[in-house]
Image: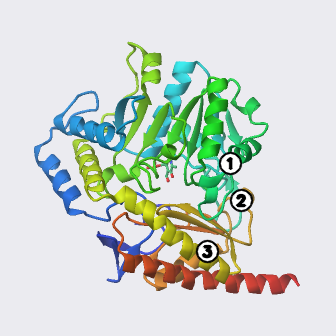
Amino acid sequence: MGIAGQEGPRVAGGEGTRFVLGDGRRVIDAMSTPAPLGHRHPRVVEAVSRALHRSPTLDEGWSTPEREAAAEALLGTALAGEDWVGAVRFGLTGSEVNDLALSLCQCVTGRRPLVTRERAYHGMVGLAREMTVQPQWHGGLSSRSGNGVRPVPPAAEVRTLPFPRSDFGQGVRMSREEARRALAGSEPRLQGAAAVIVDYTQGGCYATPAYQDELALLAAEAEVLWIADEVITGLGKGGRWFGFQRGESRPDLITLGKPMGGGAVPAAAVVVSKRVLEMIGDSSWQNYSALRSTDMGAAATRAVIEVIDEEGLVERSDRLHDVIEAAMRSLAAAHPSVERIDGRGLHWWIELHGGDWRTWQGDSAEKPIASVVAERALEAGVMIATSGERTAVLFTLAMVISDEDLERVFQALDHGLQAADEHLAVHSEARV
Ligand SMILES: Cc1ncc(COP(=O)(O)O)c(C=O)c1O
């Protein structure tokens, strides 16, 4: 019996920054967003095991010492100095907490429309799936024999904002004037909306503080709540504890997920501002799930935040940005197949020539060139991701990656991109 929808190599285990493949090979994990300290970090394993041995099975409506300690680590360490923060509620996945945050915004504003930016991915549950506007992630069925797609019909009114395009992490230098131009004409899309949700990696769209600040201004004018989706960037991969901290503006809600579980268990959270707490008032939030908040998740969150803090890994991620940016500039210069590279800190996106993401729905019988590049990189000992894209690959590194492994990742990318160069050459000849 198979597992529906599974493909790719069999992974038998994970140790530190390595995957152990079914054939015994140990390859560098350059694709796991939920493993900021690698796999089975001793501090995380110890914390989760202790919780497993001591904790009650208790639904999310109750407080426990583990949950209190995780809230303290998140609010007191990761979000230290962010005085506007009001409270946290724990969950399991990024999709789930995005649905929670979006529905809360609809509830407190009494409005239905929701806004995101082009090419966004916010998850696969409820309103999060509605806000995932990357065409290939429609939550429906895509035929691999080229017989088209059967997407799930939309249930919500979703509006999209333009994409702030940048290269090599230069979005951080975008001026306010450029941001205004990028968002020109967006006011009507915000009018009457409940929330705008924006993340800091998806679709190859990284930190652009000026865009964030300009959008925050437009959202405030239209009385739209702003959710910072930090499911990938929360806890430091982008060189700040949170992506929004590069800008001057502050969100109304933050959603967090993947790294919170320390590469061991599911854990996620919605953080709400004091202002949103006031909007909730003395009401009870009638949204509940029996297994949503676990002590094992809370223990992992506390441990992962402590290690990141003690070892200065946020600052390290920021420093490594420059090393990676230099390597990416060299790769782009060496490989004609590269159309654009962007990234921030330890998360990077390489866009290849040869396809338009707007028309890609994952319904082709032909193997996408991105998958071929990923296979070649694996030959060179590094697992990178495609996120189901046809012409984009991405890589993300554990915050504890060694300098030698970083070098091996660059070499594997170089090896993988040769396949894209060959593909481009064949297709260009065919067009001549
Ligand atoms: C920005 C962003 N938000 C939300 C999600 C959904 O998180 P999860 O896969 O844990 O449901 C993802 C997943 O990749 C993401 O990249």
Q: Where is the C terminus found, in terms of image quarters?
A: bottom right
Give the amino acid at mark 2.
Gly
Task: From the viewer's side, name the closer residue of 15 and 57.
Answer: 15
Image marks 3 and 1: residues in contact by CB distance under 8 Å: no
Q: Give percent across and percent down for residue 22.
A: 35, 78
Give the amino acid at mark 1.
Ser
Q: CA distance from mark 1 to mark 2?
A: 41 Å
Give the amino acid at mark 3.
Arg
Q: Quick one: label 3 or label 1, which is nearer the N terminus?
A: 1
* View extreme (right): residue: 432
398 left or right, relative to 123: left
The residue that label 2 is drawn on is 148
Which picture quadrant has residue 196? top right
Q: Is residue 223 visible?
A: yes
**Which mark's residue is nearer the viewer, 3 or 2?**
3
The residue that label 1 is drawn on is 175
Image marks 3 and 2: residues in contact by CB distance under 8 Å: no
The residue that label 3 is drawn on is 329
What residue is drawn where x is 46% and y is 33%?
100
Q: Quick one: label 3 or label 2, which is nearer the N terminus?
A: 2
Q: Is residue 388 visible?
A: no
What residue is drawn where x is 68% and y is 23%?
192
